[in-house]
Image (spheres, rainbow, N blue to C red):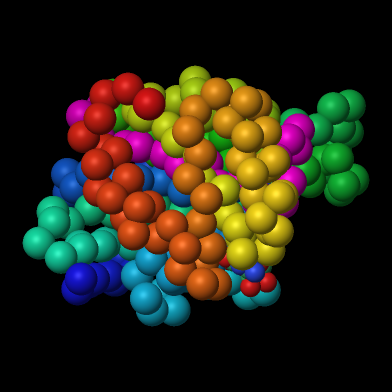
């Protein structure tokens, strides 16, 4: 199936978001969960920067994609939230806590502006939380899922790097993920391509759904 994909823009805030009305699927996950690698595997080209390259990790990166005869849409790479967890007792911007708090506020401003478009512009946004399938129950992922559920649009979960699991781990971890997050979890590997067709189908259908 032919895939047409291009990088469109990196957005730091509301003024930078594309102004057309294409539906969007936002990908969210901790740094290193495999988000850029997954985007590159989906579009079969090295469009997304991987974590090793600094710079764009605090921006929302928009990729316009079209698969086969399907409608065009955006895949949006939201910033990793590894750095953006709530900092308690932070004092001043020059402490690690202060910097973390600033990053948290920056993440909040960007994502608030991002999701607000569903209300202001009638934008269709669906979100997928990526979780490393080797580590099903991390606090930061559970917090992210709670946060995501407070955002508008349908949500889903994708377990990454499934090629790293043994058969037994795969059964155990996918059960654990489905119990913890209470939704079906799609397991994928950017390395060997497992689950990517199904993920494309999910991506294509998500923005049209009203419920997760
Ligand atoms: P990001 O920070 O979420 O964008 O993560 P990256 O895409 O940069 O991936 C982080 C690391 O995980 C890199 O070393 C990737 O090569 C590795 N990785 C990503 N996806 C896979 C996968 O499906 N299988 C395996 N084995 N490694 C992966």
Screen quadrant of the C terminus:
top left
Specify the segment rendered in magenta.
120-140
Tell which quarter ligand 1 is in: bottom right
163 relative position to 70: left or right: right
- The residue at the point 15 percent across, 65 percent down is 68
In the picture shown, does residue 149 fall above or below 123? above
Screen quadrant of the N terminus:
bottom left
State the image coordinates of residue 143 (x, y, percent, origin top left): 67, 29
State the image coordinates of residue 62 (x, y, percent, origin top left): 36, 58
Q: In this rendering, does residue 35 appear at all?
A: yes
Outermost residue toward the front?
168
165 relative position to 186: left or right: right
- Let me know if residue 71 is in the magenta part: no
In the picture shown, does residue 154 fall above or below 163? above
- The residue at the point 21 percent across, 34 percent down is 208
- The residue at the point 87 percent across, 47 percent down is 96
Q: In this rendering, does residue 58 appear at all?
A: no
Q: Considering depth in this image, is 8 or 195 the residue closer to the camera?
A: 195
- Let me know if residue 129 is in the magenta part: yes
State the image coordinates of residue 165 (x, y, percent, origin top left): 69, 58
In the picture shown, does residue 25 fall above or below 85? below
């Amino acid at each position: 199936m032919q895939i047409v994909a291009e990088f469109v823009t990196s957005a730091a805030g509301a003024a930078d978001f594309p102004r057309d009305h294409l539906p969007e699927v936002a990908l969210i996950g901790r740094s290193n969960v495999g988000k850029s690698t997954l985007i590159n595997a989906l579009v079969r080209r090295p469009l997304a920067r991987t974590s090793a390259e600094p710079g764009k990790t605090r921006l929302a990166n928009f990729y316009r994609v079209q698969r086969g005869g399907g409608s065009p849409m955006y895949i949006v790479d939201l910033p990793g939230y590894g750095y953006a967890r709530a900092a308690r007792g932070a004092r001043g911007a020059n402490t690690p806590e202060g910097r973390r708090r600033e990053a948290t506020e920056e993440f909040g401003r960007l994502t608030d502006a991002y999701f607000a478009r569903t209300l202001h512009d009638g934008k269709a946004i669906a979100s997928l939380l990526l979780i490393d399938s080797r580590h099903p129950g991390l606090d930061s992922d559970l917090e992210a899922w709670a946060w995501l559920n407070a955002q508008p649009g349908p949500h889903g979960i994708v377990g990454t790097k499934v090629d790293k699991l043994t058969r037994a781990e795969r059964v155990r971890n996918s059960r654990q993920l489905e119990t913890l997050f209470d939704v079906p979890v799609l397991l994928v590997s950017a390395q060997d391509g497992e689950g990517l067709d199904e993920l494309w189908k999910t991506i294509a259908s998500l923005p049209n759904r009203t419920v997760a």
